[in-house]
Amino acid sequence: MKYDKLVRDKIPEIIKRRGGVPVIHIASDKEYWQKLKEKLKEEIGEFMKNDSEGELADVLEVVYAICDFKKIDKEKLDLLRKRKSEEKGGFKDGFCSLKSLKKDILLFKYIISKSLSLNILNLF
């Protein structure tokens, strides 16, 4: 087990029940915020290795802790998620963007128009 990291609230009690002596401290707000971000990275990494529901639940638990710490209403967060999904879509269809062709299409149209102009001039 890695030490000097954020652990779940009941871990010290679990350690005591197993006959151990937990050595802990309560993080300051600044440290707690940093540890929450580290924990989120850790849990996402574990989900990437073992994409189970349990690992995803751990990620969500950290997200909820971040919401509590930052005083972000979870229902408002979900409404924001839904609004963004309605505006831009979700991630259900599996689209993977390679690049945007808008500039390429404009350049292509320009080249074609110049090419056609030159070809017309070459005919005379």
Image (cartoon, grey):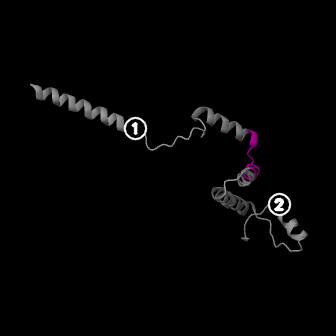
Q: Marks 2 and 1, Cα distance to the nearest angstrom?
A: 50 Å
What segment is highlighted magenta in the picture? Answer: 64-75
- In which quadrant of the rendered image does the N terminus lie? bottom right
Dot 1 surroundings within 10 Å: few (below 14), some, or many (20 or more)? few
- In which quadrant of the rendered image does the C terminus lie? top left
Q: Residue furthest left?
A: 124
Residue 117 at x, y = what percent? 19, 28
From this view, report whether residue 27 is shown above or below residue 99.
below
Question: What residue does disc 1 label?
Answer: 101
The residue at the point 31 percent across, 36 percent down is: 107
| Residue depth check, mark 2 versus mark 1: number of the one nearer the observer | 1
Q: Quadrant of residue 45?
A: bottom right
Residue 9 at x, y = what percent? 82, 60
Q: Earlier in the sequence, mark 2 or mark 1?
A: 2
Magenta stretch, main secondary structure class: helix
Q: Amino acid at mark 2?
A: Asp
Q: Is residue 68 magenta?
A: yes
Q: Secondary structure at mark 1?
A: loop
Question: What residue does disc 2 label?
Answer: 9
Q: Quadrant of residue 47?
A: bottom right
The residue at the point 21 percent across, 29 percent down is: 116
